[in-house]
Image: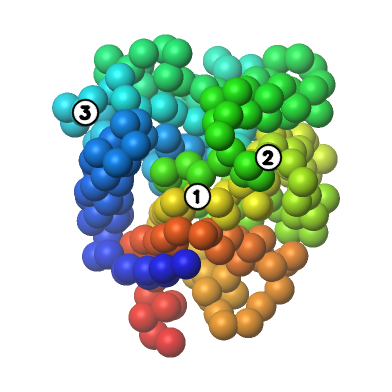
């Protein structure tokens, strides 16, 4: 694993750097493998990144969009990660609908939907032996140190034999990629903004710590790991 930690001046610089990095990864993946696969994150931090990518002229027919996790709500619900990404990016470009692969959330059965999405992924990545290798998985962290829907001291942290599982946020189910699936990515990119993330970052990036308490510590991909932080979040790292 190659690990990079960068502290940018502010959120505008954070978004610009992440956009440039993603554009670089798109070019490399298409050149080497003929397509680019990315799993998106939700939350407020990546929204301006999606808006920036929507302004780019890209080979949309060679790009496939997935999600690393999803709240268990209908696709048109205001809390849906899919809805946010569509409004900010996907519905604003000429991306084939067949290249958008959302997590299903409408069976009224999270376990069944998680299994259905895993089957969809296995159909898309038929060459995968144990886990697929996404070109890029975009992640954030919560103030509690969770990432995707991998929350502290929850059962999802123990799953090693599935691609997709059920996350639990205060008793509310979510669908999420598993730790080993994320760790098979060619590149994982964390975007972190805001002073409220400082405590979690200290524990996540420390040499030693408890990943059950700060689950983002579990993310150690086989490829590259980028932590891009704005100064409000990253000042705690600069001061170490």
Tell whether 156 sits left or right of 80.
right
Q: How far apart are marks 1 and 2 (CA)?
A: 12 Å
Tell whether 200 sits left or right of 2.
right
- Quadrant position of the C terminus in the picture: bottom left
**Is residue 184 visible from the viewing direction of this image?**
yes
Q: What element carries label 3?
A: loop
Tell whether 135 sits left or right of 52.
right
Q: Residue 236 carries which label?
A: none
Q: Upstream in the sequence, badge 3 or badge 1?
A: 3
Nearer to me, 146 or 127? 127
Compared with 45, 75 (above or below) is above
Q: Mark 2 points at which residue?
A: 163
Tell whether 209 sits left or right of 112.
left
Q: How far apart are marks 3 and 1 (CA)?
A: 22 Å
Residue positioned 65% across, 52% down in the render: 180
Where, by quadrant of the figure, is residue 195 drawn?
bottom left
Nearer to me, 180 or 230? 180
Q: Do the residues labelled 2 and 3 touch (CB within 8 Å)?
A: no
Query: 10 Å neighbourhood of mark 2: few (<14), some, or many (≥20)?
Result: many
Image color mode: rainbow
Residue positioned 36% across, 22% down in the render: 90
Q: Mark 3 points at which residue?
A: 58
Residue 81 percent across, percent down from the top left? 53, 30
Q: Upstream in the sequence, badge 1 or badge 2?
A: 2
Q: Name the residue under label 1.
A: 185
Q: Is mark 2 on a helix, strand or loop?
A: loop
**Is residue 51 visible from the viewing direction of this image?**
no
Residue positioned 42% across, 45% down in the render: 136
Q: Do the residues labelled 1 and 2 touch (CB within 8 Å)?
A: no
Residue 110 percent across, percent down from the top left? 78, 26
Where, by quadrant of the figure, is residue 131 drawn?
top right
Q: How far apart are marks 2 and 3 (CA)?
A: 29 Å
């Amino acid at each position: 694993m190659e690990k990079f930690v960068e502290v940018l001046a502010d959120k505008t610089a954070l978004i610009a750097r992440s956009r440039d990095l993603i554009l670089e990864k798109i070019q490399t993946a298409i050149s080497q493998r003929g397509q680019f696969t990315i799993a998106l994150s939700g939350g407020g931090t990546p929204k301006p990144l999606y808006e920036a990518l929507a302004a780019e002229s890209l080979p949309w027919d060679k790009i496939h969009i997935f999600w690393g996790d999803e709240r268990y709500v209908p696709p048109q619900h205001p809390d849906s990660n899919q809805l946010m990404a569509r409004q900010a990016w996907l519905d604003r470009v000429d991306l084939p609908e067949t290249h958008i692969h959302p997590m299903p959330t409408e069976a009224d059965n999270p376990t069944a939907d998680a299994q259905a999405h895993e089957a969809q992924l296995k159909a898309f990545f038929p060459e995968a032996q144990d886990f697929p290798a996404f070109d890029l998985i975009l992640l954030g962290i919560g103030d509690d140190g969770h990432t995707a829907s991998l929350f502290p001291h929850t059962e999802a942290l123990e799953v090693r034999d599935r691609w997709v599982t059920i996350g639990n946020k205060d008793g509310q189910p979510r669908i999420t990629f598993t730790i080993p699936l994320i760790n098979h990515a060619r590149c994982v990119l964390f975007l972190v903004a805001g002073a409220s993330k400082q405590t979690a970052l200290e524990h996540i990036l420390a040499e030693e710590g408890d990943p059950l308490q700060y689950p983002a510590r579990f993310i150690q991909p086989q490829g590259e790991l980028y932590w891009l932080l704005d100064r409000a979040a990253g000042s705690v790292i600069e001061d170490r």
